Amino acid sequence: MIVVLLFMGLRPLSYRFGDMVIYNIQFNNFKNGADLTLKKDVLFEYFTYFMSRVGDADLFFLTCCLLYVIPLYFFSKKVFQDYWGFAFFMLVISFSFWSYGTNGIRNGIATSIFLFGISRNNKIFSIALVLLSLSVHKSLIIPSAAYFIVLFLNNPRLYFYFWLISIPLSLLLGSLFSSLFLSLGLVEEDRVNVYLGEFDQAAEAVKLKVGFRWDFLLYSASGVFVAWYFIFKKNFQDLLYNKIVSIYLIANAFWIVVIRANYSNRFAYLSWFLLGVVIIYPYLKVQFFKNQNRIIAAISLAYFAFTYLLEVVLI
């Protein structure tokens, strides 16, 4: 954990880290006397303004990293106790971990707070943290809505069916769902055309792979299969696991129906940040197999191999 904090938190300010440059511009605007706008992601804007008054950009990005990583530690420690290191490791080697610590920074912090929040036993405290995550980045409306749905109906079987149905719905009506979602205002107006694909890729200097992403769907399905296997085949009964799985299924199903949108991985992350937990959770709670530690090692290696393939080999 210390290595991750230092390596990520002390990275140089560079365009190589995507939106890091934009965050730096916003930080320096406040440093130079700009006023708060309070138009979106209010809590993060207050945080950026405060940090501009007490330190420089290096401290700001290090603090962002702390807010991103430390809640994952507390979540892992609370839920898995002596085995917290295995869960934390799975979160760190997840496909989107690095991207949302260095590029989609607000989103990353928000999902970490959300994950920490749903692990709390005190329901009021848990709800407060979920709402807090929403004020850091408004895209958390999707997992937050799933959280409140699950509070009233924690029935994984129902959400498994919902996830399965989302696939043919996306194949048949995916473009309609994408347009409908983007019309709801969850994406900034200046980005709507980008997400819908109505832009010049040459002018944007990017190359996008769009359409129905079967590769990403298979990646998501790995968590669905693991959850189905342990809940229904192994009869693994755990209220928190049921809650996490249900939130994952709802949020991932939402992404599936808008999968054709450009940068759909940004919507996928609203469920993918839970994927490592969905996969490793049962193994750290109950011994199901002989030499289960070897199985955990193999699963971790395979999970990391996918991340390495997409982030390093195929980049």
Image: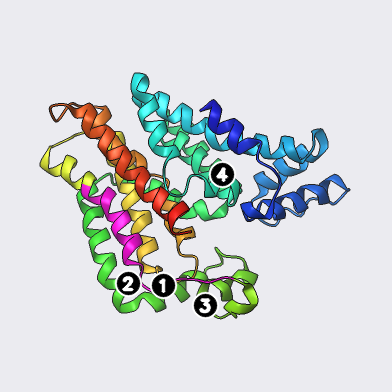
Residue occupied by mark 1: 260
Query: Depth-wise, is mark 4 or mark 1 nearer the camera?
Result: 4
Disc nearer the start of the sequence (4/1) = 4
* Predominant SS along the magenta part: helix
Q: Earlier in the sequence, mark 2 or mark 3?
A: 2
User: The residue tagged with tag 3: helix, strand or loop?
Assistant: loop
Q: Amino acid at mark 2?
A: Ser
Q: Which mark is residue 101?
A: 4
Which residue was labeled with disc 3? 197
Q: Which residues are magenta?
A: 206-225
Residue found at x 40% / y 73%: 177
Q: Mark 2 = which residue?
A: 170
Q: Is residue 151 visible?
A: no
Q: Write the residue at 18% across / 40% down.
A: 230
Asked whether 41 falls inside the magenta stretch, the response is no
Do labels 2 and 4 touch, CB within 8 Å?
Answer: no
Which class describes the residues within 10 Å of circle 2: few (<14), some (14-19), or many (20+)?
A: many
Q: Amino acid at mark 4?
A: Gly
As drawn, 120 above or below 228:
above
> Mark 4 to mark 1: distance in Å?
25 Å
Query: Are the two marked residues, 2 and 1, in contact with CB atoms closer than 8 angstroms?
Result: yes
